[in-house]
Image: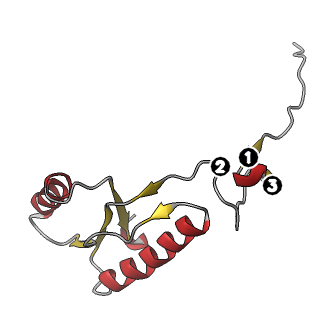
Amino acid sequence: MQVKGRLLMTPKVVYGRNTQIEAREGKWRAERKTFLKPAGAARWTCMMLTNNRLGEQMMHNFLNKYVAVCRRNGMQMADPIEPFVVDWRRTDLQTEIDAFMKDCTQQYKLEFVLCIQDNKHA
């Protein structure tokens, strides 16, 4: 059986200032580009799941870079509100996460929660 086909052109992604990026090896690299319609977050936080004793330091280092990249891409990102580290080894892990998420919605009125985990437990 023969099937007629054709090779499609690689799609381009349009960023701010009408900058078009072509895919290379299936990826669109957007270093130093602003988003076409940048969003933002005024009220947000982060929860990190880890059992690493340096988890809080790792999370703060990551968040500093995350916020910097968002801002560099044109987003209006506030600093996170009271980031939270959860230790995997806790027996009351689900209760602790549930209480944190409840506080996020009721007390802090957050727009979103970024959840991360260290690589050892992915």
The three-letter amino acid code for the residue at tag 2 is: Leu
Image marks 1 and 2: residues in contact by CB distance under 8 Å:
yes
Residues under labels 1 and 2: Cα distance? Answer: 7 Å
Question: Within the image, what quadrant is residue 31 found in?
Answer: bottom right
The residue lying at 46 percent from left, 56 percent from top is 40
The residue identified by callout 1 is 14
Question: Within the image, what quadrant is residue 94 found in?
Answer: bottom left
- SS category of the residue bearing label 3: loop
**In this view of the protein, which residue sits in the foreground, 122 or 35?**
35
The three-letter amino acid code for the residue at tag 1 is: Val
Q: Quadrant of the C terminus?
A: bottom left
Q: Which mark is residue 36?
A: 2
Q: Position of residue 41 (x, y in %)?
A: 40, 58
Q: Callout 3: few (<14), some (14-19), or many (20+) C-alpha neighbours within 10 Å?
A: few
Question: Within the image, what quadrant is residue 113 found in?
Answer: bottom left
Image marks 3 and 1: residues in contact by CB distance under 8 Å:
no
Mark 3 against mark 1, which lies toward the viewer? 1
Q: Earlier in the sequence, mark 3 or mark 1?
A: 1
Residues under labels 3 and 1: Cα distance? Answer: 15 Å
Q: Earlier in the sequence, mark 1 or mark 2?
A: 1
The residue lying at 15 percent from left, 63 percent from top is 93
Q: How many marks?
A: 3
Q: Earlier in the sequence, mark 3 or mark 2?
A: 3
The residue lying at 35 percent from left, 85 percent from top is 57
The three-letter amino acid code for the residue at tag 3 is: Arg
- SS category of the residue bearing label 2: loop
The residue lying at 14 percent from left, 52 percent from top is 106
Mark 1 against mark 2, which lies toward the viewer? 2
Image vertical order of residue 102 relative to residue 9, above or below: below
Q: Position of residue 20 (x, y in %)?
A: 80, 50
Please give left or right for residue 119 compared with residue 92 in the image.
right
Q: Which mark is residue 24?
A: 3
